[in-house]
Amino acid sequence: QLQVSGGGLVQPGGSLRLSCAASGRTSSTGVMGWFRQAPGKEREFVAAIRWSRGTTYYADSVKGRFTVSRDNAKNTVYLQMNSLKPEDTAVYYCAADVRIIWSAPIRTNDYDYDYWGQGTLVTVSS
């Protein structure tokens, strides 16, 4: 129900945009999150956005460089990544938190997200 695209190889300082197309229960409900997992490391939260209000939340490591957005008409969420660093190299996943209630803050633990895309590799290297 989540289809991720847009990964690839980019030089340090470059930009890349990831897309996550949602369908079924994952579209227009709850929160869409982006996570990443670098080689040998645990999966970590990157950014998230609410479908309804567009509220966003970012990990400190990407704040000011990454922007998450959504297109409700296309049921698609984007992650615009600028000023990329080698430490941003990872497999990036989008995920859907469909159980979050209206008033709750955006959650950052991966176990709160019920649906996952297949992941896309982002490599930042010269």
Image: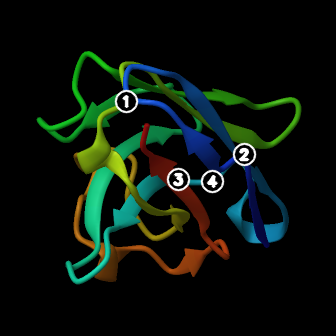
Q: Mark 3 near mark 4, Cβ–Cβ under 8 Å?
A: no
* Residue at the image position 53 percent from the left and 23 percent from the top: 15
Write down the residue under mark 1: 84
What kind of element bears circle 1? loop
- The residue most toward the left is 60
> Counting other residues with Cα less than 10 Å from the Cα at mark 3, is it few (<14), some (14-19), or many (20 or more)?
many
Disc 3 or disc 2, which is closer to the eye? 3
What kind of element bears circle 4? loop
Disc 1 or disc 4, which is closer to the eye? 1
- The type of residue carrying mark 3 is Val
Please tell me whether residue 47 is drawn above or below residue 117 in the rendered image. Answer: above
User: Residue 32 placed where, x, y %?
Assistant: 52, 51
Write down the residue under mark 4: 29
User: Residue 38 placed where, x, y %?
Assistant: 31, 69
Measure the C-alpha gap from mark 1 to mark 4.
30 Å
Let me know if residue 98 appears in the view: yes
What kind of element bears circle 2? loop
Write down the residue under mark 3: 122
